[in-house]
Image (cartoon, rainbow, N blue to C red):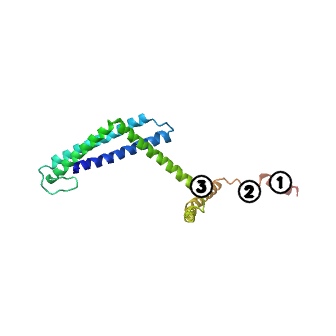
Amino acid sequence: MGRTKEAIAEGLSIATAAARLAVRNRILVDTIARGGHFDGELFGEYARATVRALADEQDQAAERVTHQRKRAWGRFSDSSGTHDYRDRDTRNLRRRAKQSRGVAKELRALADDPDRVAELVADARIAAWGDVEANLTKRLDVEGMTADADPEYAQMRKARMDALRMVDLARLASQAKRRAKEKAAAADEIPDVETDEPPAEGKSGKKKKSASR
């Protein structure tokens, strides 16, 4: 197998893995998060569209590299950057464009093959349920674990207590101080209705007493 064929095979493998990941995520969202049912035909259409979109990206990459190769032709000065190509780079750019077109061709062949699409969906489904099983197992292990069974219990307990002291207790103390200040401010705003002057009745009583004398 030549260098170009090896590069195409590697690119196809990477693109297929990306498509499988996209289908897996779609299965998780539609069947787990939204409580739907697994529909092989529906996910097959999604897988086919995903693969064709990846093929379009490879064609676009080939066009971009071809444009860069044409710009680099006949330029012999020093390059000023990574993508500032020169005439000496044209051979490599031509090979990259050929590789991208080869990957795009293989991806479209995959999308047009019902058996390969079904296999892609089946692999994505296995990966999705594998993630669900792993998460459930981890959750059950954590909830069912006792202090004796967890070798890091003491260390994690210390970390949790430190976090409680540094975060939760500090936050509670701050809230208590704020409430105390608000209460004091509210008390200061109450008007003072008391007065030091004696009542009017008291004064009139004293006058009557002196008059009788």
Instruction: Name the disc covering residue 144, or none.
Output: 3
Question: Height in image: 120 above or below 190?
Answer: above
Q: Residue furthest front?
A: 1
Which residue: 60% across, 59% down? Answer: 146
Amino acid on which disc 2 is placed: Glu
Location of residue 188 (image quadrant): bottom right
**Could you say whether the residue bearing mark 3 is in a helix, strand or loop?**
helix
| SS under mark 2 | loop
Query: How many callouts does the rendering have?
Result: 3
Residue placed at 61% from the left, 58% from the top?
A: 176
Q: Is 21 in front, or is 83?
A: 21
Is disc 2 in contact with disc 1, using a CB cutoff of under 8 Å? no
Q: Nearer the viewer, residue 65 or 12?
A: 12
Q: Secondary structure at mark 1?
A: helix
Earlier-in-chain disc, 2 versus 1: 2
Question: What residue would you read off at disc 1?
Answer: 205
Question: Dot 1, crowdedness within 10 Å: few (<14), some or many (≥20)?
Answer: few
Question: Could you give the CA–CA distance between mark 2 and mark 3, rounded to whole angstroms?
Answer: 75 Å
Residue at (63% x, 58% y) in the render: 180
Report x, y in % for residue 85.
18, 52
| Residue picked out by circle 2 | 197
Question: How far is disc 1 from disc 3 in space, using C-alphas?
Answer: 85 Å
